Amino acid sequence: DVKVTQSSRYLVKRTGEKVFLECVQDMDHENMFWYRQDPGLGLRLIYFSYDVKMKEKGDIPEGYSVSREKKERFSLILESASTNQTSMYLCASRPGKNTIYFGEGSWLTVV
Amino acid sequence: TQLLEQSPQFLSIQEGENLTVYCNSSSVFSSLQWYRQEPGEGPVLLVTVVTGGEVKKLKRLTFQFGDARKDSSLHITAAQPGDTGLYLCAGSTSGTYKYIFGTGTRLKVLA
Protein backbone atom coordinates (compact mmCIF):
# COMPACT_ATOMS: atom_id res chain seq x y z
CA ASP A 1 0.00 0.00 0.00
CA VAL A 2 1.08 3.53 -0.75
CA LYS A 3 1.88 5.50 2.36
CA VAL A 4 1.91 9.28 2.46
CA THR A 5 2.68 10.56 5.92
CA GLN A 6 2.13 14.07 7.17
CA SER A 7 4.13 14.76 10.29
CA SER A 8 1.63 16.92 12.14
CA ARG A 9 -2.12 16.30 12.26
CA TYR A 10 -3.05 19.33 14.32
CA LEU A 11 -1.13 22.56 14.80
CA VAL A 12 -1.94 25.88 16.42
CA LYS A 13 0.40 28.72 15.52
CA ARG A 14 0.49 32.44 16.18
CA THR A 15 0.27 35.10 13.50
CA GLY A 16 3.73 35.84 12.13
CA GLU A 17 5.27 32.50 13.08
CA LYS A 18 7.15 30.42 10.54
CA VAL A 19 5.40 27.09 10.01
CA PHE A 20 6.77 23.90 8.50
CA LEU A 21 4.51 21.12 7.28
CA GLU A 22 6.36 17.94 6.42
CA CYS A 23 5.30 15.15 4.10
CA VAL A 24 7.00 11.84 3.35
CA GLN A 25 6.04 9.17 0.84
CA ASP A 26 7.47 5.68 0.71
CA MET A 27 6.77 4.68 -2.90
CA ASP A 28 9.50 6.51 -4.82
CA HIS A 29 6.93 8.72 -6.56
CA GLU A 30 8.26 11.47 -8.78
CA ASN A 31 5.47 13.95 -8.17
CA MET A 32 4.39 15.46 -4.89
CA PHE A 33 1.74 18.07 -4.17
CA TRP A 34 0.47 20.37 -1.48
CA TYR A 35 -3.22 21.33 -1.42
CA ARG A 36 -5.36 23.24 0.97
CA GLN A 37 -9.00 22.41 1.48
CA ASP A 38 -11.54 24.92 2.68
CA PRO A 39 -15.32 24.64 3.00
CA GLY A 40 -17.03 25.74 -0.19
CA LEU A 41 -13.74 26.13 -2.06
CA GLY A 42 -12.75 22.50 -2.51
CA LEU A 43 -9.17 21.41 -2.99
CA ARG A 44 -6.79 24.08 -4.24
CA LEU A 45 -3.25 23.38 -5.39
CA ILE A 46 -0.55 25.40 -3.65
CA TYR A 47 2.64 23.93 -5.11
CA PHE A 48 3.80 20.77 -6.76
CA SER A 49 7.14 19.16 -7.45
CA TYR A 50 7.94 16.75 -10.26
CA ASP A 51 11.48 15.99 -9.17
CA VAL A 52 14.02 16.67 -6.46
CA LYS A 53 14.75 20.39 -6.18
CA MET A 54 12.10 21.14 -8.79
CA LYS A 55 8.92 23.00 -7.96
CA GLU A 56 6.03 24.64 -9.74
CA LYS A 57 3.47 27.09 -8.46
CA GLY A 58 -0.07 25.90 -8.26
CA ASP A 59 -3.19 28.01 -8.16
CA ILE A 60 -2.62 29.73 -4.80
CA PRO A 61 1.12 29.93 -4.03
CA GLU A 62 1.08 33.35 -2.37
CA GLY A 63 2.30 33.22 1.22
CA TYR A 64 3.80 29.74 0.80
CA SER A 65 7.07 28.20 -0.27
CA VAL A 66 8.19 24.58 -0.62
CA SER A 67 11.31 22.49 -0.40
CA ARG A 68 12.14 19.16 -1.94
CA GLU A 69 15.70 18.16 -1.10
CA LYS A 70 15.02 14.43 -1.22
CA LYS A 71 12.65 12.50 -3.44
CA GLU A 72 10.59 11.16 -0.57
CA ARG A 73 10.10 14.42 1.30
CA PHE A 74 8.16 17.54 0.35
CA SER A 75 7.87 20.40 2.82
CA LEU A 76 5.42 23.29 2.83
CA ILE A 77 6.60 26.48 4.50
CA LEU A 78 4.55 29.39 5.70
CA GLU A 79 7.13 32.14 6.15
CA SER A 80 4.86 34.32 8.26
CA ALA A 81 1.60 32.65 9.14
CA SER A 82 -1.60 34.64 8.86
CA THR A 83 -5.11 33.90 10.04
CA ASN A 84 -6.34 33.40 6.46
CA GLN A 85 -4.00 30.43 6.23
CA THR A 86 -6.05 28.54 8.78
CA SER A 87 -7.04 25.47 6.83
CA MET A 88 -6.71 21.74 6.25
CA TYR A 89 -3.49 21.03 4.33
CA LEU A 90 -3.20 17.88 2.26
CA CYS A 91 -0.02 16.40 0.88
CA ALA A 92 -0.19 13.97 -2.01
CA SER A 93 2.13 11.97 -4.19
CA ARG A 94 1.81 10.44 -7.61
CA PRO A 95 3.88 8.17 -9.85
CA GLY A 96 4.15 9.85 -13.23
CA LYS A 97 0.72 10.90 -14.50
CA ASN A 98 -1.23 8.27 -12.62
CA THR A 99 -3.41 8.28 -9.54
CA ILE A 100 -2.76 10.70 -6.69
CA TYR A 101 -2.50 9.34 -3.15
CA PHE A 102 -3.17 11.58 -0.18
CA GLY A 103 -1.85 11.87 3.33
CA GLU A 104 -4.18 12.13 6.31
CA GLY A 105 -4.11 15.92 6.36
CA SER A 106 -2.80 18.58 8.69
CA TRP A 107 -5.20 20.94 10.41
CA LEU A 108 -3.53 24.31 10.91
CA THR A 109 -5.08 27.01 13.04
CA VAL A 110 -3.41 30.43 13.05
CA VAL A 111 -4.44 32.65 15.94
CA THR B 1 -10.11 26.62 -16.48
CA GLN B 2 -10.94 22.96 -16.69
CA LEU B 3 -13.76 21.95 -14.41
CA LEU B 4 -15.20 18.75 -13.08
CA GLU B 5 -18.73 19.40 -11.93
CA GLN B 6 -20.35 17.01 -9.53
CA SER B 7 -24.02 16.63 -8.80
CA PRO B 8 -25.74 16.63 -6.49
CA GLN B 9 -23.73 18.81 -4.17
CA PHE B 10 -25.46 17.46 -1.06
CA LEU B 11 -27.44 14.30 -0.52
CA SER B 12 -29.17 13.06 2.61
CA ILE B 13 -30.83 9.66 2.36
CA GLN B 14 -32.13 6.84 4.52
CA GLU B 15 -30.22 3.63 5.06
CA GLY B 16 -31.06 1.11 2.36
CA GLU B 17 -31.73 3.60 -0.41
CA ASN B 18 -29.84 3.73 -3.69
CA LEU B 19 -28.12 6.81 -5.05
CA THR B 20 -26.07 8.03 -7.98
CA VAL B 21 -23.47 10.78 -8.05
CA TYR B 22 -22.42 12.35 -11.33
CA CYS B 23 -19.14 13.90 -12.43
CA ASN B 24 -19.13 15.87 -15.69
CA SER B 25 -16.65 17.83 -17.74
CA SER B 26 -16.23 19.27 -21.20
CA SER B 27 -12.67 17.92 -21.27
CA VAL B 28 -11.45 14.44 -22.09
CA PHE B 29 -9.63 12.70 -19.25
CA SER B 30 -6.92 10.10 -19.62
CA SER B 31 -8.12 8.57 -16.36
CA LEU B 32 -10.52 9.45 -13.63
CA GLN B 33 -10.47 8.64 -9.94
CA TRP B 34 -13.09 8.59 -7.21
CA TYR B 35 -12.20 9.32 -3.59
CA ARG B 36 -14.11 9.29 -0.32
CA GLN B 37 -13.14 11.67 2.42
CA GLU B 38 -14.34 11.42 5.99
CA PRO B 39 -14.35 14.45 8.30
CA GLY B 40 -10.85 15.38 9.44
CA GLU B 41 -9.14 12.86 7.17
CA GLY B 42 -7.47 12.92 3.77
CA PRO B 43 -9.27 11.59 0.68
CA VAL B 44 -8.98 7.84 0.23
CA LEU B 45 -8.85 6.38 -3.25
CA LEU B 46 -11.82 4.18 -4.17
CA VAL B 47 -11.21 3.43 -7.83
CA THR B 48 -9.46 4.47 -11.02
CA VAL B 49 -11.18 4.17 -14.39
CA VAL B 50 -9.19 4.45 -17.58
CA THR B 51 -11.11 3.10 -20.57
CA GLY B 52 -14.17 4.78 -22.06
CA GLY B 53 -17.27 2.81 -21.11
CA GLU B 54 -15.47 0.99 -18.30
CA VAL B 55 -17.52 -0.23 -15.35
CA LYS B 56 -15.93 -1.19 -12.04
CA LYS B 57 -17.60 -2.59 -8.95
CA LEU B 58 -16.41 -2.28 -5.39
CA LYS B 59 -18.88 -4.18 -3.19
CA ARG B 60 -22.04 -1.99 -3.26
CA LEU B 61 -20.37 0.76 -5.28
CA THR B 62 -20.47 0.79 -9.09
CA PHE B 63 -18.32 3.22 -11.06
CA GLN B 64 -18.74 3.99 -14.72
CA PHE B 65 -16.54 6.02 -17.07
CA GLY B 66 -18.35 7.64 -19.96
CA ASP B 67 -17.70 6.42 -23.49
CA ALA B 68 -16.13 9.75 -24.43
CA ARG B 69 -14.12 9.87 -21.16
CA LYS B 70 -15.68 13.22 -20.22
CA ASP B 71 -17.93 12.03 -17.43
CA SER B 72 -18.32 9.41 -14.76
CA SER B 73 -20.89 8.18 -12.28
CA LEU B 74 -20.84 6.49 -8.91
CA HIS B 75 -23.84 4.38 -7.92
CA ILE B 76 -24.29 3.12 -4.37
CA THR B 77 -26.75 0.29 -3.74
CA ALA B 78 -28.42 -0.05 -0.35
CA ALA B 79 -26.52 2.80 1.25
CA GLN B 80 -25.29 2.39 4.81
CA PRO B 81 -24.32 4.98 7.45
CA GLY B 82 -20.68 4.00 6.88
CA ASP B 83 -20.97 5.41 3.34
CA THR B 84 -21.35 8.91 4.78
CA GLY B 85 -18.64 11.27 3.59
CA LEU B 86 -17.46 13.61 0.88
CA TYR B 87 -17.12 11.97 -2.54
CA LEU B 88 -14.69 13.54 -4.96
CA CYS B 89 -13.99 12.74 -8.57
CA ALA B 90 -10.64 13.79 -9.99
CA GLY B 91 -8.44 13.25 -12.96
CA SER B 92 -5.95 14.62 -15.39
CA THR B 93 -6.17 15.32 -19.07
CA SER B 94 -3.60 13.94 -21.47
CA GLY B 95 -0.11 15.39 -21.40
CA THR B 96 -0.45 17.37 -18.20
CA TYR B 97 0.68 17.00 -14.60
CA LYS B 98 -2.23 19.05 -13.40
CA TYR B 99 -4.80 17.09 -11.46
CA ILE B 100 -8.35 18.46 -11.44
CA PHE B 101 -10.79 17.83 -8.62
CA GLY B 102 -14.53 17.79 -8.79
CA THR B 103 -16.65 20.11 -6.73
CA GLY B 104 -17.56 17.28 -4.34
CA THR B 105 -20.74 15.53 -3.20
CA ARG B 106 -21.44 15.43 0.50
CA LEU B 107 -23.43 12.31 1.35
CA LYS B 108 -25.17 11.62 4.62
CA VAL B 109 -26.82 8.26 5.19
CA LEU B 110 -29.24 8.20 8.10
CA ALA B 111 -29.77 5.04 10.14
Image (cartoon, rainbow, N blue to C red):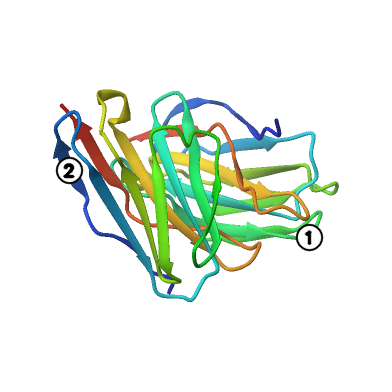
In the image, B19: left or right of A79? right
What type is the residue that disc 1 sits on? Thr
* Residue plotted at (60% across, 37% down): B20
Would you say residue A91 is visible in this rendering?
yes
In the image, B47: left or right of B16? right
Would you say residue B83 is visible in this rendering?
no
| Same chain shared by disc 2 and disc 1 | no
Of the 4 image quadrants, the one containing the C terminus of chain A is top left
Of the 4 image quadrants, the one containing the N terminus of chain A is bottom left
* Callout 2: chain: A
* Label 1, residues with CA under 10 Å away: few <14, some 14-19, many ≥20: some
Q: Nearer the viewer, mark 2 or mark 1?
A: 2
- Residue position for label 1: B51
* Label drawn at residue A11: 2
Secondary structure beneath dot 2 equals strand
Q: Which residue is more in the foreground, A8 or A79?
A: A79
The spot of residue A103 in percent (x, y) is 37, 57
Relative to A68, say whether A71 is above or below: below
In the image, B4: left or right of B104? right
* Residue plotted at (38% across, 40% down): B84
The spot of residue A98 in percent (x, y) is 63, 63
* Label 2, residues with CA under 10 Å away: few <14, some 14-19, many ≥20: few
The spot of residue A84 in percent (x, y) is 31, 24
What type is the residue that disc 2 sits on? Leu
Count of picture labels? 2
* Residue plotted at (43% across, 71% down): A2
